[in-house]
Image (spheres, grey):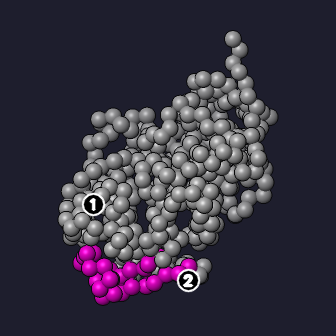
């Protein structure tokens, strides 16, 4: 029997947070939208699962801070539509030495963009956060807008909203072939579909889909250990004690971040913003679990800086990062096929920005003028990946 073909305005591959927000914006604009996911939902194989993510306006790059203004509005709109809390404001505390250049640049950016923040001396930090130890005399920068996004609840709310808006979500359908053309044909393990445009938001599987289309992105896939640490005194690092999310700069080659207790009773998430190379197909294999150098770094950090936590992780989960060399996103059309749009390389900080990323990918797929300057996100910033490569 011939494969059944359905015609869509747009197909989105990958039902992580970026794909869901892209489908959400398309459905909002009354487009006939199909969202495909290779795994059965919900799943924990990609980058968007888990209970929580940090949300903030504190960024080195002013273009992200500008995007975050609208992100907060769209997050609030989704929260209102879903009728459930998706966000909690806790503040985000950035910690580092007074001379730390990142800290200075972020503070200047917040001031320039009129984001409410406070600069805290070592003494003020010690008085306000008595269960943080500052052995080097660190200072603080508090982004008052910072807080927690409830990741799993947000994904579920988006998928529900897409369906309510008339979009179709099909999980358990792995894409096995993409044939470009005026209409793009997408073949899955179940059937074939056709669409006027295609958006690829496949996380660590992005290059597997792009190689047959003549292009490969400079993406590094990492397996991240997400660690939770037990409080010695329950609630001491909780939201009820006004404990904020934090980002510690300059201690290690990569940042250490934390969120107040809440996901698991009495456990605080403290993790390292980096991991180990991993094939996404083999992420859960035993050999992928052997390198725990980052956990040892975190144990030393917890012992030295968070004295009211036990310095051995109580729970270790895993997550995939898909990093670009400069840790900025890829938001662009395929260099040869302008009705194929690529959203990739979210480098462990894309969740909070997904509302605007999804809007941009919607605009690109419909050939609309993008709402933001996309120069930082163009494929052409990587040498050798232009049309000559194809």
Magenta-highlighted residues: 115-143
Left or right, 219 with respect to 67, comes to: left
Residue located farthest toward the front when viewing the structure as drawn: 83
The tag earlier along the polypeptide, 1 or 2, is 2
The label nearer to you, 1 versus 2, is 1
Identified at 53% across, 81% down, the residue is 116
Kindly state the secondary structure of the residue where label 1 is placed. Answer: loop
Does residue 153 show up? yes
What count of labels does the image hold?
2
| Between 41 and 10, the one nearer to me in the picture | 41
Determine which residue is flagged by label 1: 266
Q: Position of residue 389 (x, y in %)?
A: 65, 41
On-image quarter of the C terminus: top right
| Nearer to us in this view, 377 or 387 | 377
Query: For mark 1, does the 10 Å Cα neighbourhood hold few (<14), some (14 to 19), or many (20 or more) residues?
Result: many
Residue at x 70% of width, y 64% of height: 373
- From the image, tell me which residue sits under label 2: 111
The stretch drawn in magenta includes residue 283: no
Judged from the image, the secondary structure of the residue bearing numbered disc 2 is: helix
Left or right of residue 384, residue 262 in this image: left
Q: Residue furthest top?
A: 1
- The answer to whether 216 is drawn above or below residue 77 in the figure is above
The percent coordinates of residue 28 (x first, y second) are 72, 51
Q: Could you say which disc has been placed on residue 304 in the image?
A: none
Q: Is residue 119 magenta?
A: yes
The image position of residue 101, as x and y in percent, is 44, 77
Q: Looking at the image, do the residues carrying marks 1 and 2 touch, with CB atoms under 8 Å apart?
A: no
**How far apart in space, not on screen, are marks 1 and 2 (Cα)?**
35 Å
């Amino acid at each position: 029997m011939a494969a059944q073909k359905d015609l869509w305005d747009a197909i989105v591959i990958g039902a992580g947070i970026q794909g869901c927000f892209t489908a959400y914006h398309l459905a909002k604009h009354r487009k006939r939208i199909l969202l495909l996911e290779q795994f059965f939902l919900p799943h924990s194989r990609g980058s968007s699962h888990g209970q929580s993510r940090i949300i903030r306006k504190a960024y080195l790059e002013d273009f992200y801070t500008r995007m975050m203004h609208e992100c907060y509005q769209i997050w609030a709109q989704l929260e209102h539509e879903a009728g459930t809390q998706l966000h909690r404001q806790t503040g985000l505390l950035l910690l580092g030495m007074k001379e730390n250049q990142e800290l200075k640049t972020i503070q200047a950016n917040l001031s320039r963009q009129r984001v409410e923040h406070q600069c805290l001396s070592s003494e003020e930090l010690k008085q306000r956060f008595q269960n943080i130890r500052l052995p080097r005399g660190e200072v603080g920068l508090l982004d008052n807008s910072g807080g927690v996004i409830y990741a799993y609840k947000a994904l579920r709310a988006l998928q529900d909203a897409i369906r309510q808006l008339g979009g179709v979500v099909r999980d358990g359908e792995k894409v096995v072939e993409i044939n470009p053309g005026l209409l793009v044909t997408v073949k899955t393990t179940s059937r074939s579909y056709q669409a006027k445009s295609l958006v690829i938001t496949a996380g660590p599987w992005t290059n597997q889909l792009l190689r047959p289309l003549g292009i490969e992105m400079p993406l590094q896939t990492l397996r991240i250990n997400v660690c939770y640490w037990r409080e010695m005194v329950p609630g001491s690092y909780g939201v009820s004690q006004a404990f904020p999310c934090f980002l510690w700069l300059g201690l290690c080659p990569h940042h250490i971040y934390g969120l107040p207790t809440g996901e698991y009773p009495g456990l605080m998430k403290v993790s390292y913003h980096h991991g180990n190379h991993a094939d996404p197909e083999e992420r859960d294999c035993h050999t992928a679990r052997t390198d725990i150098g980052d956990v040892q770094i975190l144990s030393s950090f917890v012992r030295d800086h968070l004295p009211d936590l036990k310095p051995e992780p109580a729970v270790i989960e895993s997550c995939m990062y898909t990093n670009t060399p400069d840790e900025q996103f890829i938001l662009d059309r395929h260099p040869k096929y302008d009705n194929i749009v690529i959203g990739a390389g979210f480098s462990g900080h894309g969740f909070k920005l997904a509302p605007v990323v999804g809007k941009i990918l919607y605009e690109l797929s419909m050939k609309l003028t993008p709402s933001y300057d996309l120069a930082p996100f163009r494929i052409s910033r990587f040498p050798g990946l232009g049309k000559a490569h194809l």
